[in-house]
Amino acid sequence: MTKKTTPPTARPPRRPKKRPDPKAIGLAAKAPASGQGDPMQTIGAQRQLTTQLKTARKRTNSSARWLNRQLNDPFVAEAKRQGYRSRAAFKLVGLDDRFGFLKPGARVLDLGCAPGGWLQVAAQRTGADQTDAKAERGRVLGIDLQEVEPVPGALIWQGDMRDEATQAWVVEQAGGKLDAVISDMAASSTGHGPTDHLRVMMLIDIAFDVAEQLLAPGGTFVAKVLQGGAQKQTLDRLKQAFTKVQTVKPEASRSDSREQFIVAQGFRGT
């Protein structure tokens, strides 16, 4: 008996794979027309947008707002361009441009100096960062509870200003009375405005106690303050010790911030 065999089934011909439509998957693959820009710049812009969108999905609303503010803040960009460690450096730049207390050869103490932006400005303006032996060189000291990376021209001590060892270091390194005591110190925010204000005022009192001991007659005291009723008592105290006291808001301070700075000049001496 002859066994029947089934002929093999013919396979259908393969269809060529269809390339996806770039528009359908959200990619701008179309090259720019002549004279409309560099294609690499267009690709870079697309990548940046994609990264921002992906990152935004993973962030809280407050984090997304902070990131957007940082990306659109001209002082952040300028600080990066000039090599400053924070945008806060421009607050001191603005204050010194107006009041002129960071003179060449001046002795300056920066309280709460992390991350070092104010130290950088002070060292540059007093000449403390100069390597030329003929240049008039200032003396810039910084103190903070946190460790701070070295800043050219500045001496940094990690510790609490209220400690005797810290105070002894300042007296030894300053080589004389100080021309300016500056402070950008701020307590960690609690989210409760009156409480935060009182904590900042406490830091100002500590900084002023230091200034009273170490400032030379005619010296300057600069400190951050938050708007609030409790600052009158501090201002009255400063007016007794200085010939001129002003409260100002530098251009680099954000418009939605309650931050201001007290600038007290003409220390009467102790």
Image (spheres, rainbow, N blue to C red):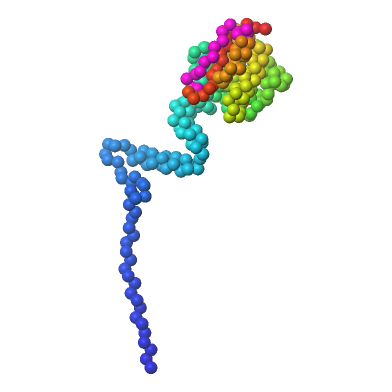
Q: Quadrant of the N terminus?
A: bottom left
Frontmost residue, 81 versus 30? 30
Q: Residue at the location (47% across, 31% down)?
A: 69
- Left or right placement of residue 106 versus residue 16 in this view: right
Frontmost residue, 209 versus 138? 209
Is residue 231 in view from this perspective?
Answer: yes
Q: Position of residue 172 (x, y in %)?
A: 69, 16
Q: Quadrant of the C terminus?
A: top right
Q: Position of residue 86 (x, y in %)?
A: 52, 27
- Left or right placement of residue 9 versus residue 105 in this view: left
- Residue, far right: 164
- Residue, far bottom: 1
Is residue 150 in view from this perspective?
Answer: no
Taking 232 as reference, is 46 above or below it? below
* Magenta stretch: includes residue 250: yes
Magenta range is: 238-253
**Residue 7 falls in image quadrant:** bottom left
What is the total number of numbered labels drawn onto the structure image?
0
